[in-house]
Amino acid sequence: MVAMPVGSVSMDGMFPVSPTSAASLTGSLLVASPALADTPFARSVIFLCAHVPGQGAMGLIVNRRLPQPGLDDVLGQLGIDPVPPRRRIDLCAGGPVDGGRGFVLHSSDWTGEGSMSIDGETTLTASLDVLRDIADGAGPRRALLALGHASWQDDQLEDEIIHRNAWLPAPASDDILFGSDHRAKWRQALAAINIDPIRLSALAGHA
C-alpha cells in the first residue's frame, strides 16, 4: 500500500508521454505474474495510460482500494463542495510514484481541461473540474480516483515483460477498471487471457 502524505492532494500535471504508437500497449492491462509475488506489485492490475515502446510508460493500479484518506477527506483538502459528495467513486492507490498527486480515470463521455483520451473509451483527467462535477452528482458515467501512479523508464517495461516475465498484457474492460470488487480484478484480468491463476502459480514454482 502506498504511504500517503499528510499534505493536500495536488491534481496538477500529467505524465508527458504521447499515447500514440503502433506497437504501444496504451489502453491495455498489465497483470502481475507470480514473479512479483514478493514485491509491492503482487497481484496488481495496472491500466496503461501511456506507453511508447523504448521510451517509457505510465499506468494506474486499479485494484488497490485506498482506505485512507477517504474520498471526503480528499475533497475537503481540495476545497471541493459538497462534502459529503452527492456521488461517490472508488479511491485507489494508483502506484508508488507521486503518491500525493491525483488522477481521475473515467469513461470518455466527459472531457475537460487537463483531460487526455487514452483509447477512445477511457480518459485520464488531472484537473479538479471532473471532481467538482462528480461531487455535484454529475460527471462521467464511470470513474475512479487514483492517488499516485506507476511509471517505467526507457525499455524498462519491455525488459520486465519479455525477459523477467513480470507482467502479462491483457485487454481492459469497464468491469475491471471501474468495478467495485477489487479483490476479484486480478483473477478477472487473467481470465480475459484464458489463464488459470492456480496453474500460473504452479508453473512459476509457487504453492
Image (tube, rainbow, N blue to C red):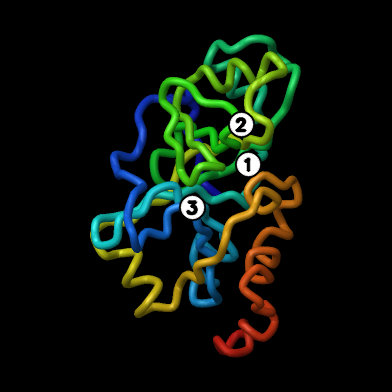
Could you tell me residue 39's position as x and y percent? 49, 66
Question: How far apart, in angstroms, are the residues tagged by discs 1 and 2?
Answer: 7 Å
Mark 1 near mark 2, Cβ–Cβ under 8 Å? yes
Query: Within the image, what quadrant is residue 207 found in?
Result: bottom right
Which secondary structure, mark 3?
Answer: loop
In front of the other: 146 or 171: 171
Which secondary structure, mark 1?
Answer: loop
Identify which residue is drawn at 72% across, 57% down: 183
Per the image, the residue denoted by label 3 is 27
Q: Is residue 102 left or right of residue 196?
A: left
In front of the other: 127 or 100: 127
In front of the other: 74 or 59: 59
**Precedes in sequence: disc 3 or disc 2:** 3
Could you tell me residue 81's position as x and y percent? 64, 10
Per the image, the residue denoted by label 2 is 69
Per the image, the residue denoted by label 1 is 66
**How many numbered marks have been drawn onto this rendered protein structure?**
3
Amino acid at dot 2: Pro
Could you tell me residue 182's position as x and y percent? 70, 52
Amino acid at dot 3: Gly
Mark 1 near mark 3, Cβ–Cβ under 8 Å? no
**Precedes in sequence: disc 1 or disc 3:** 3
Identify which residue is drawn at 31% across, 44% down: 18
Amino acid at dot 1: Leu
Q: Is residue 4 left or right of residue 206?
A: left
Which secondary structure, mark 2?
Answer: loop
